């Protein structure tokens, strides 16, 4: 059995049932409910991230050739920030909230109370394999649940590091790591959980939701999609290009909120080309293969898929690739047909197509004709464009002037809409996701003010009601 300490050994449905039964027993004892327990777990997790930062950095380098600084900001530091934000506000978030009682029901007091759900399953992907396993776990623990964490098998070093360190750090009665791939995840999904939190692609999202439906288990689906970066004339193209290149080529484009394509209005389509080339050169040098700051594609399947897209437009910059090292240069494609394969699926790699549209109307029509994206980015100098994009489109998030940075605002929710996901988390939104908000009414028995409501409904009572 691969739970907690060993790696890549298959678990059977019976093993999965045992794990869930054990966690359910823990939950039933009330062990995970006290605030003190929750905070102690979060502090322990924080300590682990600080003390074992080098071990996690090495694992992420082995899996994705991630640069140490990028690993710190997007994986380790971002998780520490999530813990700190939660620890600072948890008391307040968990305080019962008074709700006014209408005159006809007084005297009485009403309140809402957030209570933990029970045992939750967290299924993580490979692209930010540490943060996307731990950030949901922070919410699950903070809300007082027990949890199974299933890291991605496509990031095996990080998966092994989590399986090694979490049992040495957290309460093993309450948190279990199960490593493995499809058979292990399938075995887990056969069990009845109180919530399933899945991050990954929409195809598997449907499998997860179908499995959860059998138990009427609520799900959060953190999915992906094609996030556009609209560029309007009049914007500072050099800065826009730098920010788009930064968001796109971080982690070699394998970021769910990366700008998927540039939706360039009018002449910006050609005007932005040299700025993108310059930005890439400034960040990764003339040969990004030599840059310690540039990552690699996760596996050969994704490498082959991505190199298959390189012919879908005129190469502005990049295109060089090497299958042996899974290197694919930061690539910009221009003159791309909107019906080309590169525009039909989420790219999830370092290929940036530029699509030209004549005006803002056409840009909005282009966006709304497609699935609702996880993020919509816009670089514009006009308040009208901001207002119209906000009111005439829909997306998980909307960010003007900066891709990805909205994830750094701890009070903002993170989640998609439509094909890009279901539900949201981070901070207080995680508490909502992993809690049930219970309605509580407390009405004194003395002075039975309900008497008027009891049958028989005499004419005089009916008049008063
Ligand atoms: P992945 O292949 O690592 O899969 C994610 C998880 O699903 C893994 O733990 C895997 O074991 C499990 N899984 C795979 N196939 C399964 C099956 N048939 N049944 C049950 N479980 C299965 O990751 P991925 O899906 O390639 O991740 C990339 C996608 O995730 C992209 O679409 C990206 O946009 C999206 N993503 C979204 C977010 C977000 O927060 N919204 C973050 C990262 C990635």
Image (cartoon, rainbow, N blue to C red):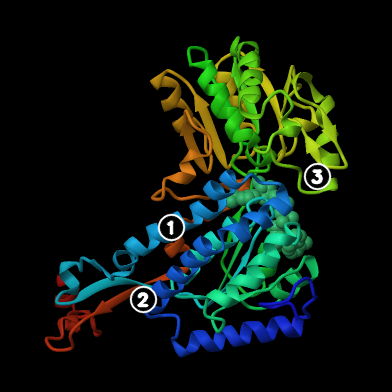
Callouts 2 and 3 close, C-beta under 8 Å: no
Cβ(mark 3) to ligand 1 < 8 Å?
yes
Placement of 135 over or under 460, stated as above or below: above
**Residue lying at 43% horizontally and 69% vertically, measured from the top left:** 43
* Quarter location, residue 291: top right
Mark 3 neighbour density, 10 Å: few (under 14) some (14–19) many (20 or more) = some
Mark 1 neighbour density, 10 Å: few (under 14) some (14–19) many (20 or more) = some
Among the two numbered marks 2 and 3 on one chain, the one whose residue lies closer to the N terminus: 2
Residue 109 position, x and y percent, is 20, 75
Foreground disc of the pair 1, 2: 2
Among the two numbered marks 1 and 2 on one chain, the one whose residue lies closer to the N terminus: 2
Mark 2 neighbour density, 10 Å: few (under 14) some (14–19) many (20 or more) = some
The residue positioned farthest toward the left in the image shown: 447
**Residue lying at 56% horizontally and 15% vertically, measured from the top left:** 359
Res 35 label: 2
**Residue lying at 68% horizontally and 60% vertically, measured from the top left:** 158
How many marks are shown on the rendered structure? 3
Q: Which residue is mark 3?
A: 302
């Amino acid at each position: 059995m691969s739970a907690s300490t060993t790696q890549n050994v298959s678990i059977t449905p019976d093993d999965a049932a045992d794990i869930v039964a054990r966690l359910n027993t823990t939950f039933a004892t009330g062990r995970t409910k006290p605030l003190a327990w929750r905070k102690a777990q979060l502090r322990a997790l924080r300590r682990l991230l600080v003390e074992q930062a080098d071990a996690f950095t090495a694992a992420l380098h082995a899996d994705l050739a991630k640069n140490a600084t990028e690993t710190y900001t997007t994986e380790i530091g971002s998780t520490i920030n999530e813990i700190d934000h939660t620890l600072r506000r948890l008391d307040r978030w968990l305080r019962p909230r008074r709700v006014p009682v209408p005159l006809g029901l007084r005297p009485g007091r009403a309140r809402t109370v957030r209570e933990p759900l029970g045992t939750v399953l967290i299924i993580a992907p490979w692209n930010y394999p540490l943060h996307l396993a731990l950030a949901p776990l922070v919410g699950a623990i903070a809300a007082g649940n027990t949890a199974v964490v299933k890291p991605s098998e496509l990031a095996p070093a990080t998966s092994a590091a989590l399986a090694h360190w979490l049992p040495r750090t957290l309460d093993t009665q309450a948190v279990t790591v199960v490593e493995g791939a499809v058979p292990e995840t399938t075995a887990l999904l056969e069990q009845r959980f109180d919530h399933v939190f899945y991050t990954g692609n929409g195809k598997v999202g449907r499998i997860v939701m179908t499995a959860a439906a059998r138990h009427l288990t609520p799900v959060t689906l953190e999915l992906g999609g094609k996030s556009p970066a609209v560029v309007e004339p009049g914007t500072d193209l050099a800065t826009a290009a730098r920010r788009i290149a930064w968001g796109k080529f971080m982690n070699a484009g394998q970021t769910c909120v990366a700008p998927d394509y540039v939706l360039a209005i009018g002449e910006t389509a050609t005007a932005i080309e040299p700025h993108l080339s310059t930005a890439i050169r400034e960040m990764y040098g003339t040969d990004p293969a030599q840059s310690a700051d540039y990552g690699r594609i996760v596996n050969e399947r994704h490498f082959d898929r991505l190199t298959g897209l390189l012919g879908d437009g005129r190469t502005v910059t990049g295109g060089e690739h090497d299958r042996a090292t899974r290197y694919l240069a930061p690539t910009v494609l221009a003159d791309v047909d909107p019906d080309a394969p590169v525009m039909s699926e989420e790219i999830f790699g370092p290929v940036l197509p530029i699509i030209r549209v004549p005006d803002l109307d056409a840009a909005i029509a282009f966006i709304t004709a497609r699935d609702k994206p996880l993020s919509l980015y816009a670089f514009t100098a006009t308040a009208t464009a901001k207002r119209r994009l906000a009111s005439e489109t829909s997306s998980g998030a909307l960010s003007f002037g900066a891709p990805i940075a909205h994830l750094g605002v701890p009070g903002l929710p993170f989640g998609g809409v439509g094909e890009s996901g279901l539900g949201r988390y981070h901070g207080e939104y995680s508490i909502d996701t992993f809690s049930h908000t219970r309605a509580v009414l407390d009405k004194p028995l003395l002075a039975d003010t309900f008497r008027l409501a009891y049958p028989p409904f005499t004419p005089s009572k009916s008049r008063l009601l």
